[in-house]
Amino acid sequence: MNRIGVFVCHCGLNIAQTVDVEKLANIISDYPGVVYATNYIYMCSDPGQDMIKEIVKEKKLNGVVVACCSPTMHETTFRNTVASVGLNPYRCEIANIREQCSWVHKDKKIATEKAVEIVKATIEKLKLDKSLIPLSVPITKRALVIGGGIAGIQASLDIADSGYEVVLVERNQSIGGHMLQLSETFPTLDCPQCIATPKMVQVGQHPKIKLLAYSEVEEVSGYVGNFKVKIRRKASFVDWNKCTGCGLCVEKCPVRVPSEFNELLVKRKAIYTLFPQAVPNKPVIDSNNCLYLTKGKCRACEKNCLAKAIDFNQKDTFVEEDVGAIVVATGYDLMDKAEIGEYGAGKYKDVINGLQMERLLCPSGPTEGIPHRPSDGKIPKEIVFIQCVGSRDPEHYYPYCSKVCCMYVVKQAMLYKNVVPDGQAYVFYMDIRCDGKGYEEFLQKGMEENKILYLRGRVSKLFKDGDKIKVWGADTLTGRKIEISADMVVLAMAVVPSKGVKELARKLRITADDYGFLTEAHPKLRPVESLTAGYFLAGAAQGPKDIPDVVAQASGAASKVDSLFSQDVLYHEPIIASVDEEVCVGCGNCVDVCAYDAIELDLRTKKAKVNSAVCEGCGACCAACPSGAMQHNNFSKRQIFEMVDAFVR
């Protein structure tokens, strides 16, 4: 026999302004199975929850419906409330009369009628709800961090400092990421190398961190608390255990190719370390450009290596690691200049992107902090910076703001003026977004003290004119056309996800948005968690961010991992799929649609089998099952039909 209590929330005026909450409670009090119905201004408040507890005990309720906001807001709140007085939490349902009713209607009569139907349908579902018990699974208290930029470094150190082991995987030969390429950081103009390298050294020396540089995640299986990760260790053709990092091999190598770390502005050797402060500070051989590996001759590095560390027979190897949680901190790249046809499509050497300008301004960069034109090595006397190149342009490129461009452009213009006092910097902008502490003051300093000329408008075209770059634009404040003969142009290119992140997301079974940035579970309430349990997001893998936000989010992700590892066992939601083997025909539709790889066909019985620890209860398999064998706990087909009947009867 059902003894159901219904509790209608006013949510201040969010619900009560559009829905007649008293009338709703009165109507529902006479509905079959309901023994009590009331309303209160804030059900989620302590007095509201205390009311529910008292009524559950007093009326001996075996089911509760709370008519309020979205279940994503307070379902856990009210389930914990009823559980505290002995009622199974899965016998508590939320009727969403805010987002699905009051917020989308203006007519109070219509909204109230709709709210009544929503609550009736929820009651019908509750009548068939089972008293479920959460599943318990063991936890491997060891974390994997993917990406060794500042986000991955911070997350690794925070988790390791909490006493848990960390496996840090970085695809480059050194950790550090893009931060090590920067000249100075805004708004304090600190040296990024001075900030980041101590943390890099800590990672390299930390007893709880296993650093796997020059490696990539190949395959991930398992579920939260129990992941098995296969990692490819790429062949460096150098035995890092023997190598002393003396650099003699690099010195003797005759091959010179463009340096990726220096954004192709200068050349490196075929055997090289990424940068002087690299961690680990060991060289790798570029197999695409090494004379011995491509043409079978040279071996100068091997002949001059006193430690006998060169190994041309080295192959990729694989290691497997067991972990309980995974932090994804894969960082960002910049949009390719070649995609912007109106700005030269990458053909002009003196049209560079923001990271290239960082290398030219960096004291340890190829020009020792004094920018030179890539085409002829001359110091530019007039530089044009163009903001929002590829960003905030939904018709052609990306609709989102890349967030850091406004600030790094003013920083670069200031640094340029410091080393070339007689030079002139122009900045074309749409508008300026200074959303951080001290950022607005930093901008004003650049404009007033450094005489940076800001021009509000877009550049329509730029082209080569002798040894100059002709820039055509417009000043929308004055309505005048502008033409500048610049020595160099810096494009603030759109920030995009790092190369290969979509493929990685598929391996990890986590979601990415249309542009490739990883998707958080909830933008406000769960900003560092993925929808797939056990995965946490950090840094620019989720979207464009500046360094303070990256570090803060990395620490937030680490704290989530620490919270997970603080438990002896992990409890998993029991609202998952199950199979009626007598009905299942083994068609495999459910296996194909499962985004979490939680279903497989049993080779012996030819029946579908659900891994309950992996299933996230999305329901896709139930919708795809043609025989009706796949059912969803507390979302059965009968429950759905009863809810529909409640609406139409």
Image (cartoon, grey):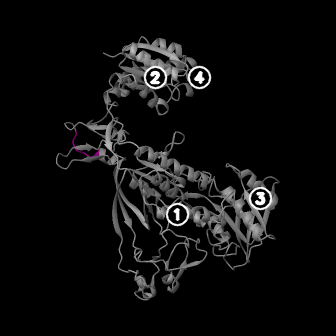
Q: CA gap, disc 4 to disc 1? A: 50 Å
Residue 506 seen in the figure: yes
| Dot 3: element | helix
Query: What residue is rendered at 47% in x and 17% in y?
Result: 51
Q: Amino acid at mark 4?
A: Gly
Residue 200: numbered disc? 1
- Residue occupied by mark 2: 66
Circles 2, 1 touching at the beta carbon (< 8 Å): no
Q: Amino acid at mark 1?
A: Met
Q: Amino acid at mark 2?
A: Val
| Dot 4: element | loop
Magenta range is 584-589
Q: Is residue 555 above or below residue 642?
A: below
Q: Residues within 10 Å of mark 3 (few under 14, many from 20)?
A: some
Q: Earlier in the sequence, mark 2 or mark 4?
A: 4
Quadrant location, the C terminus: top left
Q: CA gap, disc 2 to disc 1? A: 51 Å
Q: Residues within 10 Å of mark 2 (few under 14, many from 20)?
A: many
Front residue of 579 and 440? 440
